[in-house]
Amino acid sequence: MQFGYRIIDDLISGLQTYMASRGISQLADLAGEKIKDFSPASELDRETMVFPKIDRELCVGCGRCSVSCYDGGHQAITFDESRKPKIIGQNSSRKPLFLSSA
């Protein structure tokens, strides 16, 4: 996990700020609010694959992209001995690597 468990504090703080901006005092008031905007898994596009793009001029070899990608369950980025990221190509066990949200 890239940021450790402190991310939970950030999530709680963000949720509190969001609720205050909407005038919501109880989390239960949000439950189900956006359910109409969700699609069942059977309707998701499982064929479109979008791979990450790495700007090699800006890359400092820190590995954050690899850690985030690995933690997200995709394992699409690895590093070679020179700490340069490498995008792993199509692999049926990793399909789809990234889904386009647009």
Image: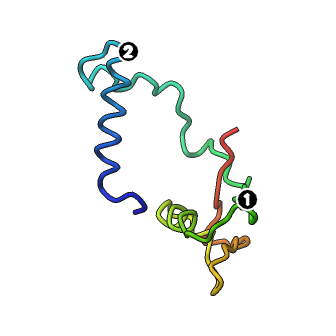
Q: Where is residue 66 in the image (x, y as percent from the top left)?
A: 56, 68
For residue 40, above or below residue 2: above
Residue type highlighted by circle 2: Arg
How far across and down, in percent of the image, does residue 71 sit?
47, 64
Q: How many marks?
A: 2
Task: Name the residue that disc number 1 marks.
Answer: 53
On screen, residue 7 above or below 84: above
Question: Which quadrant: the C terminus?
Answer: top right
Which residue is pictured at 30% across the width and 37% down the height? 12
Residue 49 in percent (x, y) is at: 72, 56
In the drawing, does residue 10 fall left or right of residue 47? left
* Badge 2 element: helix
Per the model, the C-alpha gap separating discs 1 and 2 is 36 Å
Q: Residue 22 carries which label?
A: 2
**Neighbour tally class for label 2: few under 14, some 14-19, many 20 plus, Cα within 10 Å:** few
Q: Which amino acid does the dot numbered 1 rest on?
A: Lys
The residue that appears at 75% across and 64% down in the rendered structure is 57
